[in-house]
Amino acid sequence: MAEDELTQTGIRVGGWLPAVPAEPARAPEPPPGPRRFPGDPVAPPAGSAAPPVPDAPPAEPAAPDVPARAGPDAPLAAPRPVAPVRHSAPEGVAARLAGLIAPAAARVRTAVGAAPDRPTRVGVARARRRRRRMILAGAALTALVLVLAYAGRGAEPDGAPALPAAVPTAAAPVPTAAPPTVVPVTGSPALPGGPLLNLDQEPVPPSVPLTALGTRDWLHWGGAGAASVQRKQRGTGEIGDLAGDRLEHNAGVSALTWTDGTPTARQDGTRSGVFQRGAGKSFALSVAGSGDLRTVRLFVGAFSAGARLEVRLSGGGDPAVREVALAAGDRFFQYVVHFRAPRGQRLLVTWRALTVVGAENDGVTLEAVTVS
């Protein structure tokens, strides 16, 4: 234990000593009050209302609290007590409203981005967006100016607007005759073999396309007089006509058409033909053989007459025959001949009037023949 502590308690090494009295306790200091200056009124005690102060003339300013000395040996005067500080007047209503509104206004300006108080992330992002919008608006305006400038270049030097160039249009094709059909005289044998002859009869169609049926050759009689003949352009020339006395007619029941004829290149439908009047009169035709199978179509008729069709090969053999009984009126027929003959031989065709009713123009008729 320290010596001072032992002394305070009256314990001393080597004997007892009287106890040293402790220091008297200090009174607690009063709380600091407001400072008063000379001339301030005396503040009323707490909890009491201040009595009204009558109007009094202003007091003379007191001398500063400086102690005066009469001489070097004079005692110092005691300092005067300090007066409490005077409180300021309470704030006005306008000042309080300004204090309340100013922070709210600042927050509104910051929210709308008008005048941010400090550079926050939101403010920086908004500034970037505004800058980007300005850049995009400038780019759009520049593009618009360029487009208008480019459009203005389309005017002529004299200021007249340039007219668009006319789009070239293809000229309408001029209808011409179909190109001639070129078919070789001979080709690969079809159904090769020995001589062959077959004769059939088929109904007469309302329209007869000579170009389609006569792929190798075709002939048509009449249309421009009894001696007129139309044939296939560049045909094979396989059809032979032995001629004879003829008259022209326009009483056919089939419309004959072609697109590769000569001297008339195209015909959309004619009913003309030739005829011979009287019993015993006939038409004689021939078709050259090539060793291939051929199909011949014969378009003939009878005016109030009985007739006979006979086909045979020039190299011999039995003929093929068809007869038409005597009857009044105009009748027309289509005969189909399939034949094969060696080169150098021919198919011989005879269409003869056997009997007639007795009128002036009774007899047999001939319209067309095709070979394919």
Image (cartoon, rainbow, N blue to C red):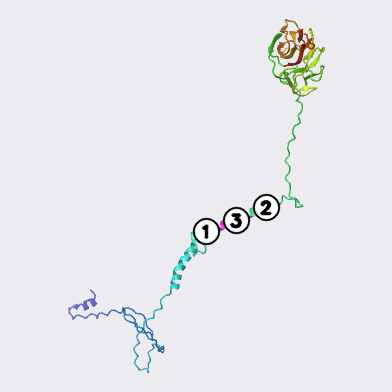
**Which residues are the magenta region?**
128-141
- Whole-angstrom CA distance, mark 2 to mark 1, is 33 Å
- For residue 77, the mark is none
Query: Percent position (x, y) of residue 302?
Result: 75, 12
Mark 2 burial class by Cα count in 10 Å: few <14, some 14-19, many 20+: few
Q: Please name whichever residue, 168 or 199, is drawn nearer the observer in this view of the structure.
A: 199
Residue 178 lies, in percent from the top left, at: 75, 25
> At numbered mark 1, what does the secondary structure look like: helix, strand or loop?
helix
Residue at the (43%, 71%) spot, across then down:
96
Residue 135 lies in the magenta-colored region = yes
Horizontal relation, residue 6 to residue 158: left or right: left
Cα separation, mark 3 vs mark 1, equals 16 Å
Q: According to the image, label 3 marks what residue? A: 137
Depth order, front residue of 114/212: 212
User: 331 and 153: which one is in front?
Assistant: 331
Characterize the magenta stretch by its predominant secondary structure.
helix
